[in-house]
Image (spheres, grey):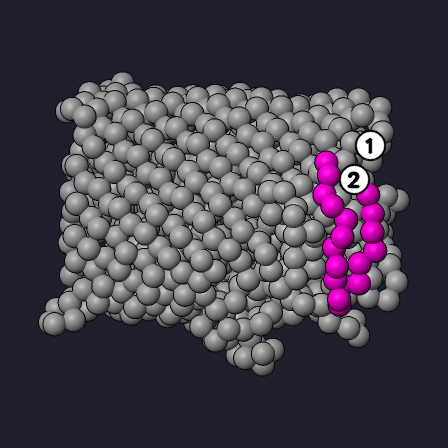
Amino acid sequence: MLKRSALCLAILSALAPLSGFADPPAVDALADITVMGSKTDRTSAGEVDGYQAFTADSATKTRTPLKKIPQSVQVVPNKLMKDQQVQSVSETLRNVSGVVPNNPLTIPGWEATLVRGFSAEQAQDGANLNYNLGDRESTVNIERIEVLKGPNAVLYGGSSGTPVGGTVNLVSKQPEKEKFGKVGITIGSHDLLKPSFDLNQPLSETAQLRVTGEYTQSKSQVEGMERESYNLNPTLKLTDNAKTTLTLQGKTSRWEGQDYQGLPATGTIAGDFKINRDLFLGNKDLPNSTSALDSLAANLDHQLNDTWSVAAKVRTANSDFDEKGQTLIGGDGFTANAPTVGSSWGVTNVNVYQEQQDVSVTADVKGEFKTEKTKTEVLVGVEHSTLDDEGFMDTDGAEVVDLTNPVFALPYTDPNTAFRWAGKVANKTSGVYAQAQHSMNDRVHVLGGAKLAKVEVVYADSFGADENTSETKLLPRAGVVVDMNANASAFASYSEGLRGVGWANYSDTPKPIESKQTEAGIKFSANQQLSGSVAAFQIDRDNTGIPDPATGGMTSLPNGAERSKGAEVDVVWQPNPGFSLTANYAKTDATYTKAAGAIPAGNKLAGVPEHSGRVWGNYTFKTGKAKGVSVGAGVYAQSEAMLTGSNDFKAPAFHTVDAKVGYETKRFETALTVKNLTNEQYFERFNYFSGRVAPGADRTVYLSTAIKF
């Protein structure tokens, strides 16, 4: 397997997915145009041609051509998601270089996506999703995903502050003027049942309504696990069709299922005995854990005149999760890399409950100025947000279980001990920001901006801690793109971020996390067929949380310092209207830059493969008897990844192969998809408990069918 994975990585590095940076078509009118014989769609989310995206909103808060943005921004269009028949947001993010997504076996109780080795924020239409609770993996309401790499303090804040690693922006489907609908169902391995719908209904000339929804029920390759989730997404757009638009977005989302705790390193990827890779740790009568999110956002856009416009957004959200599990205690505490004795571990009941209330407000003014040889766009705005995040953690009861012949006899009961830990983190953020984009002779494109940001963190817990930290800092952002010729542009940029901390049990006063990124690269396009980018980067972060060795990792020290540097390649090739290929490759070196706790400087960060990438190709027959038939296949591969910051265990390299065949007409579509076609047996780092692993998904088969009207 290791040789085959190495071969796949070599192929990826030679080729190298994602979003193209071809010149965008003119955007003076909202109409369809033809590029190289294929149709370029203009949607509310931006211009796309198949797998190529020409513009993005996430990087600048303005509809900007990707080739004019001096920073890595990758876009996953809906067409690519549809061709791959992705079943989750996490699976979709494999299409972006340098991204390590959430593990689908974890409960939605925190956000663990990594971009360039560091924690990234997930956002919905620019609003931070915090722990990303509820049915977070659903793609039914996503028009496209824009991934902004590195900090972008000027434009993004709210909740806990500005991103310090990157932003995964989930761009929602918006109401449209024409009536349409789609109702579908997906069935598959492990008793998967997933009905869904997407209904767009114009109410009048000035009001449009769109509602999407999805329900998922499935079992798992892990013994005895069952999961259930749903989400409902109504969006109402009110407009005068001239200057003013008010968009109201609602979301209600629920998830429930057994709490998966992962497997220890010893007995899976190390040790002289073997644990069943599909073992579920815990009593078969373990109650379900739950995760929920309810949110409402209001977006107002108003065009004052031909030069100036204003925009404002208010979002409020309530979320919570209740984790009821049974976890391991090993010779090294709750990390449980090593057994207590022989092949046996201690098992204890654990209950973690957490709830959040989040309110954020942003408002900005945009101006656009043109001369014969220049174009300038300015953006000035303010933001303010509050996030109250509180909960408790408790453990109780114990038994010893031999995991090579497990019998979990300890019944689950909610712990309620005298040593229950309870805590609260209250983050308050505010900022004033300004940004200018200036193009000269349509060859040199300069981007500059700054935010005066303030982050306040109030932390208290049941063990007597009562701390208040406040940080105010001017966060700059600057970059330049120079068009070397009609097909290639060079760019360089610098940006900073400042973010408050989330709920955790801290051993010392938590501090806002700070980050700095420098980046340079080339963006290219050739004849609207081959496009992409090559980038080199370095990110430094300070005040990050690390496990405190004095408490066996149960508490965190806020004094970590880390660095990530590397190079990435993202490519799209569409030689004709029927064939599309996307490829990516990333080399990431993420390390601790100073000793922290028991972790020495120079150690690699957990969960970050040095090499990773994906190739996917799809061909659709456009004429003849096979018209509407499509076939696709792809491979994802990554090198080994450390399980912990102490670098004592590492998950081996792996690769998987996917394939699909589909058929689509104007009113009907269906697809048969096989994930992990060769049924590779591998383990991934489990991004919850440090030092544990989870089995990679086995071969799974999906059949999706939908009717359009």
Which numbered marker is on residue 417? Answer: 1
Query: Is residue 408 covered in magenta?
Result: yes
Which region shows up in magenta? 397-414
Residue 236: give x, y in percent of width and height. 29, 26
Residue 537 occupies which quadrant of the picture?
Answer: bottom right
C-beta proximity under 8 Å, tags 2 and 1: yes
Under circle 1, the secondary element is: loop
Name the quarter where the N terminus is drawn.
bottom right
Residue occupying the far left of the picture:
624
Q: Amino acid at mark 1?
A: Thr
User: Closer to the camera, 460 or 134?
Assistant: 134
Chain-order first, disc 2 or disc 1: 2
| Mark 2, residue position | 395
* 689 in relation to 556, above or below: below
**Residue at left offset 34%, top offset 67%:** 660
State the separation of the CA atoms marked 2 and 1: 8 Å
Identify whether 398 is placed above or below 401.
Answer: above
Q: How many marks?
A: 2
